[in-house]
Image (tube, helix red, strand yellow):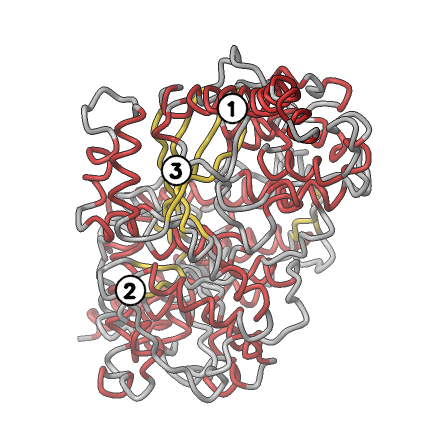
Amino acid sequence: MRAIFITVIVILCFLASYFIPLKDAVSQDIKSCLKCHSVKTLSKKLEDGQSLSLYVDGAKYEKSVHGALDCSSCHPDITLKNHPRPKKIANKMVYTKEFSKHCLNCHPQNTLMKPEVHGIVVKKGEIVCAQCHGSHYMGSIKEWKNKASFNEYCLSCHKFNITKTLPSNEKISLKVNEDEIKKSVHGKFHCIVCHSDFSKAKHPIYNFKNKAEYRAKMTDICTKCHTDKELQKNPAHYALTKTASCIECHGFHGVKPAKVAKALPENQYCLSCHSRAISMKMKNGETLSVQVKESDIINSVHKKLKCTDCHKEFSTTQHPIRSFESIKDYRAKAKDICNNCHQDAVKKYDKSIHAEAFKKGVPEAPDCIKCHDYHKTTLITKDKIASNELCVKCHGKEGQAFKSSIHHNALIQGKKDAPNCSSCHNSHDVLATNIANLNNSCLKCHKDTKSVHNKWLWNPPVRLTTFVDVHFNSASCAACHTNADKSLSVVLFDRANKKPLTESEVAKLLGIDVKEIKGKIDSNGDGKVQEKELWQFMSMIKTKVKANLSGRIDVSNPNDAHKIEVKTKAVKDCAACHSSGVAFTGKLEINREGAKPVKFELERSAFNSAYAIPNIKDFYVLGLTKIKILDTLFFLALLAGIAIPIGHITLRILTAPIRRKRREGK
């Protein structure tokens, strides 16, 4: 027994003599390094100008999981013989990445890959161990997991700028701002309340195809507490949940209480939802964006208005659900909002060719929204060029033609009275060109025009402005003030109502489809209307309504009317129109609701035939509409007028002796 006891004592002493010096040796190695690195102010200036602290707290290090290791275990390239030595370091991140490579000496990469989420970080090649685990004071992961709260555990990684790249190449940020959570309505929740499939023991990997799928999945989390039944209490909000995910409006972790939003100024409250890319669905399946950009409102003419000044049925306490058949139906009813303040403009618009086109469903037909662009409404009346550009969006050919005119030159030169589109066609009460009296538009600016024209356009010996009026009523200004081909256009006119007959009205009078009108006018189908065809058509119309043809000299191509030239180039030769050799084309026009008139080519004989007399009696252009039978009747009347006095005088002379003898009683 004594021998055994002595042997044990010897072994214990040997072990003590072995380990105690080892501990002292390691401590001595650490102490050698800490002679400098225990100085709190010790640091190194990096190339990017930042300062890297070189201080190490020895007591904390010895308590760490690496406390039994000497410094050279992690810093194998540094010894007391070669240190200190200068070493260039670009920045902290470069240094952290470089230093983290030494971790692989003890922690092989295949081991690091075993935890799936941890493995993803390692697989990316961005092994920056120290960024997450620290450098000198690392504790036991197992002990830390037991002590750390759920939020502390999750944020140990998610406080960093980590991202996930989806198969769609879209990126989603996985960074979580702890302060943002604490200030949110969910501030007292642990992460696992929402992310219930995560824990300290497991971290599943989600494989979303794109952001849309990601948002939909996140919305499923919200519906755990915010059930469908609860959401239905607010119809407007419930409708949004069917078109947008929760996080698109409320965000991720910084969800604010609803009362916070309602405390905002009214416009800000509305924009809390409408500043996002939300839309509403029409009954026919069309979708309309209801997103409102704050910058649009701030730069608009309505910038001082509240949302409820226009949208009167809405407020912070109520948001009715509005439904529309289609986007067209929505646009038609949006006009009622404008009518709250702009009654005169809406009243004029309702009578315009634009309104007629809109009612017919013409896709490009303008209305309040299309011209004034929802919330971007700007004051365009002072900016004539901006006003012009508004029209040119749809009327590009007309805008291009206008650029060659003297009017456009005056406009870009900034002349005060320079005309733009609305100067001639008006802004809201725009009429079809064959109905609108565009000559009156010219007279708005050219007020002394009648007296100027009366100096050369008169019928000797009488110099009256009524003679000028006759020309103004029968010829457009563009006919003389443009270098363009001209035509004699006749419009089918309702004498009783004093307005042109429309295509649909003609079809209704004749009891036919609109498409059949052409066959009624051009009965032989040769593409031209002869005198007898015109006579037959007018005869049919006159059995239903008092109608005639109102004639006018105009440019053949309506677009040429925009190419007004300087007055020195204007036509001042009577023979340009009043000559039988003038090569004017002839057009029969029938007005259309909400569209340009339909035109039929007329043969010259349709104007010069006796058949034309009952139908074109309201106008007569000498030479151009010369009807031969009228000339014949005129010469007969002239001969009769001359023959009667000559015959009378001749008879008086011949019968003078007889009358003399009677007086003498013989």
Q: Position of residue 19 (x, y in %)?
A: 40, 59
User: Please, what is the three-letter code of the amino acid marked with disc 1?
Assistant: Phe
Q: Which residue is mark 3?
A: 614
Q: CA distance from mark 3 to mark 2?
A: 57 Å
- What amino acid is labelled 2 in the image? Lys
The structure residue drawn at horizontal position 64% and vertical position 73%, both measured from the top left corner, is 305
Give the position of the C terminus as an image quadrant: top right
Q: Are marks 1 and 3 in contact (CB under 8 Å)?
A: no
Q: Amino acid at mark 3?
A: Pro
Q: Nearer the viewer, residue 49 or 191?
A: 191
Circle nearer the N terminus (3, 2): 2
Mark 1, residue position:
634
Which of marks 3 and 1 precedes in the sequence? 3
Sequence-first disc among 2 and 1: 2
Local secondary structure at mark 3: loop
Badge 1, how many Cα within 10 Å: few under 14, some, many 20+? few
Compare residues 656 and 147 and report the one nearer the observer: 656
Say above or below: 629 vs 240.
Answer: above
Foreground mark, 1 or 3, reads 1
